[in-house]
Image (spheres, rainbow, N blue to C red):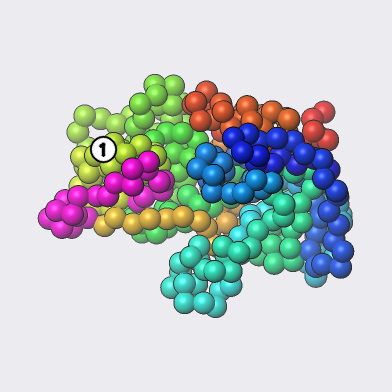
Amino acid sequence: METAQVLGEKIVIKEVEDIKLDGRKGAIVKVLGCGLCGSDIVKFKHKIVKDGAVLGHEIVAIIDEIDSDTDFKVGERIVTSHHIPCFECTFCKHGNYSMCKHFKETNIFPGGFSEKVFVSEEHLKNVAYLVPENMSNEEISFYEPLGCCVRAIKRCNLQQGDKVLVVGLGSIGLLMGEGLKAFGYDVYGCDLIQERIELANKMGIKTLPEKIEADAVFMTSGADKAIDTALKYIKQGGKILVFSSTPNNWGYANNEIYYKELTVMGSYSPSPADLKESFELLTTGKVKVSNLTTVYPLEKVQEAFNDTVSNKIFKAYIKMNNFLN
């Protein structure tokens, strides 16, 4: 089977031996396609993963082989996430599921940019869903990233009608805006790229006016200067939700937080409950993502990375070569 592996400064296609269940509980699935996540780009650019690593986790797949106590069957199309919490540790009991050790250790193998992956029994029981016939692979591939957005939105605990500013309107910013609208908030957005603002407007995200006091600011931009934007537009007593890393790792001004009684919080990855809500939002059409993806075949995965980094596209979806027709 073919896999896209990290090799130094490049991502190369490698032929490897097919994976089998070999007595394990779970499923071997044929990957139809996999979304390219910002975290994949960070891991590649900053060499967080070793050579030979297969990135990708936003998969849509068909079950090829299965040994499971679930109701899933061979030939069914599923979507799944890649991490599962233990539900028992102190992090889980406090609702911080993505900090759970078991959460960080679980994954699909070898990674989503591969023709086949192993999905464990835990994944099948907790974070896998049958894809409705009327959903395209590209649309349902937003299941996991939207789950991340759902997690962030729920952490802010806002009230219906609150004004919310999304700083950064790349694919995840637009997705966050869609999620915020679905939850009933008044959503504004800003970005340095006019094309993004225009698409956001078409999606019902309002352009940032000269004056606004936002009840919450969602930081989906990885630019250091975006922090200044958040502090400029947040109201007294407001909330800033950090949803991206920044190059220089700058912080928020202590005195701003103190005198304005601001709440600054981070949000990283979703729990199974957040993912369930994400699945429902997508399959009921409350969140729409049909205009966000650009499709690349597996052998052009490096091009997909490059185009995403250079802002040529909003979101890359890597389609497996076996399913190009």
Q: Which residue is mark 1?
A: 229
Q: Residue at x 32, y 39 (%)?
A: 224
> Vertical placement of 170 versus 83: above or below?
above
Q: Quadrant of the C terminus?
A: top right
Does the stretch in magenta take in 190? no
Percent coordinates x, y for residue 251 in the rendering: 27, 49
Amino acid of disc 1: Thr
* Visible residue check, residue 158: yes
The part of the image, by quadrant, that contains residue 47 is: top right
Q: Residue at x 85, y 48 (%)?
A: 17
State the extent of the magenta-drawn residues as a range: 241-262
Mark 1: few/some/many CA within 10 Å (<14, 14-19, 20+): some
Which sits in the foreground, 145 or 180?
145
Determine whether 88 is above or below 298 in the image: below
Residue 289 placement (x, y as % from top left):
56, 36
Residue 9 image position (x, y, % from top left):
59, 35
Number of labels in the image equals: 1
Residue 252 shown in magenta: yes
The percent coordinates of residue 319 (x first, y second) are 72, 34
Q: Residue at x 33, y 57 (%)?
A: 265
Kindly state the secondary structure of the residue where label 1 is placed: helix
Query: Which residue extends farthest front?
Result: 8
Tell me the residue at 48%/40% (across/down). Answer: 172
Query: 176 or 66: which is nearer to us?
Result: 66
Q: Would residue 37 be visible to someone looking at this image?
A: no
- Say above or below: 135 vs 301: below
